[in-house]
Image: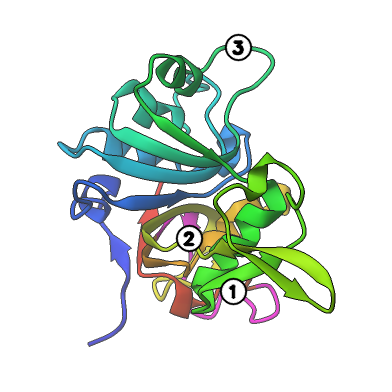
Amino acid sequence: MAINKVFASADEAVADIQDGAVILVGGFGPIVSTPGKLLEAVSKLPVKDLTAVSNSGGFGIEVWGEHDVEVLHRTGQLKKHIVSAPVNQWMDNTLEKRFRAGEVEIEMVAQGTLAERIRAAKAGLGGILILVGVGTAIEEGKRKIVVDGRKYLLELAIKADFALIRAYKADRWGNLIYRGTSRTFNATMAGAARVTIAEVDQLVELGELAPEEIVTPAAFVNRVVVR
């Protein structure tokens, strides 16, 4: 049987997400680089106690009919958010409101550390050693390891059940390319979860994507949804 990872809809692609799942959410901040259709589909599921992992905590608004991870806070489905930038200076997002109300846990992780913890899971590693946070409140409760006379913090790999990412083009095997700076955490998260679902703008025939331009190979992608 020919390999075809294309699903008929976003709803179908996320249907097996269950209570308590850990979900990587691609993108950086702008709506255009986030898997908005997949997030909207998750928001309609009867699931709860989810953990989201993303760079941004959401912008608190819907832009051009598109959603970011904010939508999962509006539905109250998230119990924890592992994030680099939980709030923003322009508006109060739902994550901030829920956190102040004691409804959600936030684990703040420096952006580079977040990327490396995700890459560690992708590579099958248990964690990474970093200098960021040594001597600060960040090191509290974390294991310290001395290498060549320098103290490092052991940051554990972030193991996820699903990765929801956004790409520009895909073929039915799941090879992906991105448009400009929208690669961001999308390429980092692809393949770092048990199931990676890619929301794409265009589906092309096999062979149309030149090997040199493919950023995420098909081996890292389980499902494809066309917007």
Whether residue 73 is in magenta: the answer is no
Calculate the distance from the C-alpha at mark 1 to the C-alpha at mark 3: 40 Å
Residue at image point 35% right, 52% down: 22
Comes first in the chain, label 1 or label 2: 2
Camera sees residue 202 = yes
**Left or right of 3, for residue 139:** right
Q: Secondary structure at mark 1?
A: loop
What residue is disc 3 on? Answer: 91
Residue extending farthest to the right is 149
Q: Does residue 66 appear left or right of residue 76 in this picture?
A: right
Seen in the picture, residue 153 relative to 31 is either above or below; the reply is: below
Residue 177, picture quadrant: bottom right
Label 1, residues with CA under 10 Å away: few <14, some 14-19, many ≥20 = some
Where residue 109 sits, quadrant-wise, is top right
Instruction: Name which residue type carries label 3.
Output: Met
Magenta segment boundaries in residue numbering: 197-213
Q: Tell which of 65 and 46 is nearer to you.
A: 46
Amino acid carrying label 2: it is Ile
Q: Which residue is mark 1?
A: 209
Labels 3 & 2 near each other (Cβ < 8 A):
no
Judging by the rendered image, the residue that carries numbered circle 2 is 158
Q: Position of residue 227 (x, y in %)?
A: 41, 46
Name the front one of labels 1 and 2.
2
Rate crowding at label 3 as few (under 14), some (14 to 19) or many (20 or more) other CA atoms within 10 Å: few
